[in-house]
Amino acid sequence: MGTALVKSPSIDPRHACFRLEIRESGIHRRGVYACERIPAHRKVIEYTGERISRRETKRRGDGLVTYLFTLDNYWTIDGAVGGSGAEIINHSCEPNLYASIVKGHILYMSRRLILPQEELTIDYRFDDDVGKVRCRCGARTCRGTINL
């Protein structure tokens, strides 16, 4: 049984370095959008949530929609429980963010200048051991699947 959808997602300003908002997305359900210019190579938001073990990750990972981010060989962060809003950021094969793990924290960093009203995206890079998930990002270089 997987984690339920985040019912009222919001951006936690304690973990966001720029003004961001959640709105309807053309990629999937809702997405996170920049409300101001975000320079290249800057921390945008930290991915937060409940820290869970691999065993619990397997249990929660069976749902249709999950908010799980692997931190290391043992820990996973479940953004559905205590998430910062970063869990709502959608996948793209041409993302404007990348993840950087620093001292046990998952930081979403800007790849390039991000303009106001632009949707924030990250490459989820699902492993092959995860069932194939169709991609709907619409990027010119879309690989057709969220998996690598």
Image: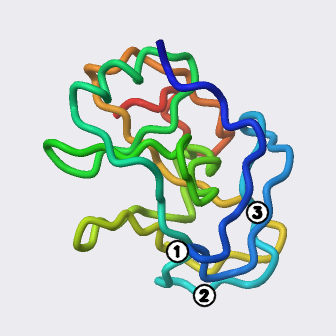
Going by the numbered disc 1, the residue's amino acid type is Ser
Residue at screen point 60% across, 77% down:
14
**Does residue 117 lie above or below 122 as drawn?**
below
Residue at screen point 70% across, 63% down:
11
**Does residue 100 lie above or below 29 as drawn?**
below
Which numbered disc flags the more N-terminal residue, 1 or 3? Answer: 3
The colour scheme is rainbow
Mark 3 element type: strand
Going by the numbered disc 2, the residue's amino acid type is Pro
Which residue is identified by label 2? 39
Question: Which of the labelled discs sits on residue 110, or is there none?
Answer: 1
In space, the residues marked 2 and 3 are separated at their CA atoms by 14 Å
Please state the horizontal and vertical placement of residue 83, each as a whole percent of the image. 56, 53
Which residue is identified by label 3? 33
Residue at screen point 38% across, 41% down:
125
Mark 1 element type: strand
